[in-house]
Image: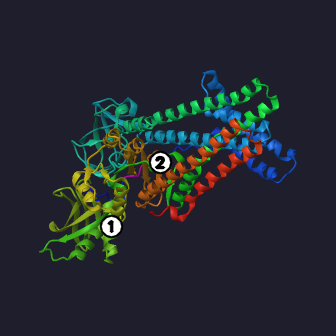
């Protein structure tokens, strides 16, 4: 809960212009062809369904079913045929065949439902892929496209991609730094939140490192380029996000193998159910009816609904409580975690400073209120976050803030103003351990006292970490870009013992992967651009939504909209309940499918009973999954 930045503020009349936020690139849902076709299929099905159930003439709903089949089925059918050309068989083609088989024996509604389910699933997958690509491209917008290079005493504007190691660039107030490098001349406040997660701008002097994409606030800087722009920290973040996303591919490959085997098995079994009786003299109609019945009862409708209703109900319940879980897969992964790692600034803390101590000197003649009021008067014209915190603290105590004249500020030195005819200076004092930001208050050159500011700890930080410890059996790890003293104070307040401080984005990723290599499934909670690679690398990632960066919000599996940290363990509990219901439903669905298939193979399963059993199991598992919509499902057991 500690800030590690200086107290230098910018003069209000000369405040550096705020750099415009990079435009957010966000793919619209209906811009995706998969989404448009799925919508057409769904609408046609929903219009046809009441007409069909209401015994309307077939000509009123028949064409609508045809539209639902065609709109939702043409693309998976085409992909399935392409897969066949590559001598593979996927479950999408199997569902198309099952749907057409159902229609062939008069079960048009069942086939249309299968088509709608698969079309919607494909649209959601396409949207998730597009949004991930949007977020990565948006990150690249943080780095400027041009820079001011200094050569032979003159200036030239060049693309940042043309910068080379050793070039000297000029960064004016309000500009973003174009490349990683070292300050050679000048002093300024640099907002590094996109890289390190620090809650406030940090003072940068000659000899200090700066990063591409960070924002220079006050004071012109001359920066010697130390790394090729293609290898900057911001570029490496993009690479890390892409690499971490690809690490999930083996699970997808495993699922595809299961689909392949299942699809081949059902097709072979259906052909056998049709061909064997026919070879032993059975009638063509009877053999075809038995085979189509087998295709229907062996179709995985109940299995699909065994999984989705619990997870979607859990998503809806979490949404009512301010947690947006992005997909059923994400909800399932949240329940699998067995250890947690937390960011500090903006996650365990609010990311905003507050005055925590007012320390007047004994011989200053001032008490705490008088010293705070004097500092607030000098800081009042400034827009710096620390200045706002000092003014807010004075107002919270109901203190009178006197008007200030001749306000000036200098990077690295502080602010000066004339208050009641006397010169007041507020500037940074070096804290002995870096655990707090300390400012000195002087009047006419005489030290009057100091103020201490820290980053405010969230009120629910300690209960949330305790709940995560109870759920996983191990205390969370604190991963932060802030320094050790700041991290230690937060850890002490929240009961965390494993602390890693001073981390860059790649260090956070390595800390997460270290635990993953040890066989743990890590939940990472963060909020900044610098947290995005760790969010992507973790088994499950949760972003704090109120002040979270676009990239963090897009990369995470879930977003805490209301910034209530205790909802993180709550959604993990809900996910575990959903996973238990999924197992229950799979057992129920498996029993129904097994019994119906054996009945059809060993005896004679009438088509109406087969359809009733198939649809009945689907309804049963669906209703069981809807139990998680209840309010009681959110509360601890």
Is residue 17 one of those drawn in magenta? yes
Q: In this orientation, which residue lies closer to the viewer: 240 or 185?
A: 240
Q: Quadrant of the C terminus?
A: bottom left
Q: In this orientation, which residue lies closer to the viewer: 141 or 120?
A: 120
* Residue 135 seen in this snapshot: yes
Expressed as whole percent of the image width and height from the top left, the position of residue 251 reads 47, 36
Q: Could you say whether the residue bearing mark 1 is in a helix, strand or loop?
A: loop
Q: Quadrant of the N terminus?
A: bottom left
Residue 624, image quadrant: bottom right
| Tag shown at residue 273 | none
Q: Residues within 10 Å of mark 2 (few under 14, many from 20)?
A: many
Q: Could you say whether the residue bearing mark 2 is in a helix, strand or loop?
A: loop
Q: On the rendered structure, is 291 left or right of 246? A: right
**Magenta stretch in the rendered image:** 16-22
Q: In this orientation, which residue lies closer to the viewer: 436 or 208?
A: 436
Expressed as whole percent of the image width and height from the top left, the position of residue 453 reads 26, 63
* Residue 381 seen in this snapshot: no
Expressed as whole percent of the image width and height from the top left, the position of residue 160 reads 39, 34
Q: In this orientation, which residue lies closer to the viewer: 100 or 293?
A: 293
Separation of disc 2 and disc 1 at Cα?
A: 41 Å
Name the residue tied to disc 2. 557
Is residue 358 one of those drawn in magenta? no
Q: How is the image coloured?
A: rainbow
Name the residue tied to disc 1. 380
At a point 72% along the width and 48% down the height, the residue shown is: 612
- Identify the mark nearer the N-term, 2 or 1: 1
Q: On the rendered structure, is 445 left or right of 513? A: left
Residue 597, image quadrant: top right
């Amino acid at each position: 809960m500690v800030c590690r930045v200086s107290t230098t503020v910018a003069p209000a009349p000369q405040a550096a212009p705020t750099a415009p936020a990079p435009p957010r690139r966000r793919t619209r849902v209906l811009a995706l062809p998969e989404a448009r076709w799925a919508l057409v299929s769904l609408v046609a099905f929903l219009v046809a369904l009441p007409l069909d159930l209401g015994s309307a003439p077939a000509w009123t709903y028949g064409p609508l079913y045809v539209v639902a089949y065609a709109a939702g089925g043409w693309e998976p059918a085409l992909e399935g045929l392409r897969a066949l050309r590559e001598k593979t068989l996927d479950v999408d083609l199997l569902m198309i065949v099952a749907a057409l088989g159902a229609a062939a024996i008069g079960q048009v509604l069942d086939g249309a439902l299968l088509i709608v389910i698969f079309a919607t699933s494909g649209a959601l997958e396409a949207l998730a892929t597009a949004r991930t690509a949007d977020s990565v491209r948006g990150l690249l917008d943080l780095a400027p496209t041009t820079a001011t290079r200094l050569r032979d005493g003159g200036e030239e504007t060049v693309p940042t991609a043309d910068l080379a190691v050793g070039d000297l660039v000029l960064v004016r107030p309000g500009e973003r730094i174009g490349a990683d490098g070292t300050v050679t001349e000048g002093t300024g406040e640099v907002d590094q939140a996109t890289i390190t997660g620090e809650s406030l701008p940090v003072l940068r002097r000659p000899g200090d490192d700066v990063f591409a994409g960070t924002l220079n606030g006050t004071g012109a800087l001359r920066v010697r380029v130390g790394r090729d722009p293609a290898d900057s920290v911001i570029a490496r973040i993009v690479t890390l996000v892409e690499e971490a996303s690809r690490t999930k591919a083996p699970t997808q490959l495993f699922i595809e193998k299961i689909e392949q085997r299942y699809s081949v098995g059902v097709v072979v079994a259906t052909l056998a159910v049709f061909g064997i009786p026919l070879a032993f003299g059975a009638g063509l109609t009877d053999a075809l009816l038995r085979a189509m019945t087998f295709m229907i009862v062996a179709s995985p409708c109940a299995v699909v609904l065994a999984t989705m209703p619990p997870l979607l109900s859990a998503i809806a319940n979490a949404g009512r409580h301010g947690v947006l879980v992005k997909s059923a897969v994400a909800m399932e992964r949240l329940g699998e975690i067995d250890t947690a790692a937390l960011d500090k600034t903006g996650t365990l803390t609010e990311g905003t400073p507050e005055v925590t101590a007012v320390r007047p000197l004994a011989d200053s003649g001032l008490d705490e209120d008088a010293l705070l009021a004097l500092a607030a008067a000098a800081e009042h014209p400034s827009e710096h976050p620390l200045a706002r915190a000092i003014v807010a603290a004075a107002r919270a105590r109901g203190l009178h803030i006197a008007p200030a004249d001749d306000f000036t500020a200098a990077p690295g030195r502080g602010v000066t103003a004339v208050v009641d005819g006397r010169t007041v200076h507020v500037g940074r004092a070096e804290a002995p351990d870096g655990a707090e930001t300390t400012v000195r208050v002087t009047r006419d050159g005489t030290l009057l006292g100091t103020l201490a500011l820290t980053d405010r700890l969230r009120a629910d930080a300690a209960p949330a970490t305790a709940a995560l410890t109870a759920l996983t059996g191990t205390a969370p790890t604190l991963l932060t870009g802030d320094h050790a003293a700041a991290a230690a104070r937060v850890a002490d307040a929240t009961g965390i013992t494993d602390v890693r401080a001073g981390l860059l984005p790649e260090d956070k990723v390595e800390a997460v992967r270290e635990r993953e290599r040890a066989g743990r499934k890590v939940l990472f909670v963060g909020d900044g651009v610098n947290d995005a690679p760790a969010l992507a690398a973790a088994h499950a990632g949760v972003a704090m939504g109120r002040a979270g960066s676009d990239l963090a919000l897009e990369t995470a599996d879930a977003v805490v909209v209301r910034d209530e940290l205790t909802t993180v363990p709550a959604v993990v509990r809900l996910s575990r309940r959903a996973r238990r219901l999924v197992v229950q439903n799979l057992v129920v669905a498996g029993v129904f499918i097994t019994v119906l298939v054996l009945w059809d193979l060993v005896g004679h399963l009438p088509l109406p009973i087969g359809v009733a059993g198939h649809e009945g199991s689907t309804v049963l598992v669906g209703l069981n999954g809807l139990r998680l919509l209840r309010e009681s499902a959110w509360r601890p057991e």
